[in-house]
Amino acid sequence: MISRFANPARFMRLSATALPWCGWLTLAIVTLGLYLALVTAPPDYQQGESVRIMYIHVPAAWMALSVYLFIAVASGVALVWRHPLAEIAAGAAAPIGAAFTFVCLATGSLWGRPMWGAWWVWDARLTSVLVLFFLYLGYIALVNAFDEPSRGARAGSVLALVGVVNLPIIKFSVDWWNTLHQPASVMRLGGPRIDPSMLVPLLVMAVGFLLLFVTLLQLGMRAALNERKALALRLNSAPAPGRVASRERPVPAQSPIH
Amino acid sequence: MIGDIVRYLAMGGYAAFVWPAYGVALAVLGGLAWHCWRRYRASAVALEKLQREFGTRR
């Protein structure tokens, strides 16, 4: 079933219909989320209005982890079944994941300064997320370091699978070590420990960020498929090397031996 | 009215942290969306041009 839907031509057809819907839905949900986060959500009894940073920091962090997991799964599929669409999906997702991770780090820093008194601390949660950001950058650099796209994608897939070990470290860092960062208050056993007046804007922003990922992923995959198709077209229509050589190279002089 | 707006923008004294946080998110994610759209359009135009040049559709 996966291979039925993961056919590049079928993906192009399906995404041509889905892309405008995803784009407009993303805009609508993010606008609603921003309204809820900046206008209707109450200030925190301890953190005051600075808690509004949470509505972008936390969804960005969720997306940073989820997108990496998506890349790892797509990389696994690409390595095992050699599916071209899987490696294209992984490659297109990486810059989006890196952007979410950067937003998570930057907004966390801006939230940490007034709450902890420091822009940055080398504690387990912050450091492991920074490592995730470098993993994204390393993956992007490695995928683009080869002339042949599929070789780069294969090397990147191995890195993505090795780097997945960082995900549980990030998730459980707040439980395993003493950190400044607070433990989980939404995704925890026993249900969320956060008031609905704050939980609803948070979840709406999370859905908005997820839709943004889906939209940008489709755009990136369509662009990569177009580029690969254009490259194949150029290579197929180029004159055969023998003919180029005979036309462009000068006739070699007679060998002095004979 | 203006006082309400100024009070809202002050974010209870945290304006220097809240607005830059939203600004960074908008700049990074908006910039990425713009870049993705531009790349997609450029790739579609280039492919269409090649297909017209070589007379191959799809």
Image: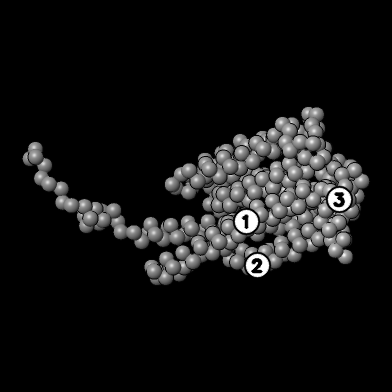
Residue A112 in the figure: left or right of residue A231: right
Please tell me whether mark 1 or mark 3 is closer to you in this view.
3
- Badge 2 crowding class, 10 Å Cα cut-off, few under 14, some 14 to 19, many 20 or more, is few
- Badge 1 crowding class, 10 Å Cα cut-off, few under 14, some 14 to 19, many 20 or more, is few
Please tell me whether mark 1 or mark 2 is closer to you in this view.
1
Q: Amino acid at mark 3?
A: Gly
Q: The N terminus of chain A appears in which quarter of the rendering?
A: bottom right
> Which residue position holds label 3?
B12
Callout 1 secondary element: helix
In the rendered view, would you say A134 is above or below B44?
above
Q: Quadrant of residue A212?
A: bottom right
Q: Amino acid at mark 1?
A: Gly
Question: Which residue lies at the image location 65% right of the left edge and 52% below the top edge?
Answer: B28
Q: Position of residue A28 (x, y in %)?
A: 75, 65
What distance separates the C-alpha of mark 1 from that of mark 2?
Answer: 19 Å
What distance separates the C-alpha of mark 2 from that of mark 3?
Answer: 39 Å
Q: Position of residue A164 (x, y in %)?
A: 65, 38
Q: Residue furthest front?
A: B3
> Which residue position holds label 1?
B31
Q: Amino acid at mark 2?
A: Pro
- Closest to the observer, A162 or A41: A41
Instruction: Read off the chain for label 3.
Output: B
Q: Which mark is residue A86?
A: none
Q: Which mark is residue A20?
A: 2
- Closest to the observer, A34 or A205: A34
Q: How many marks?
A: 3
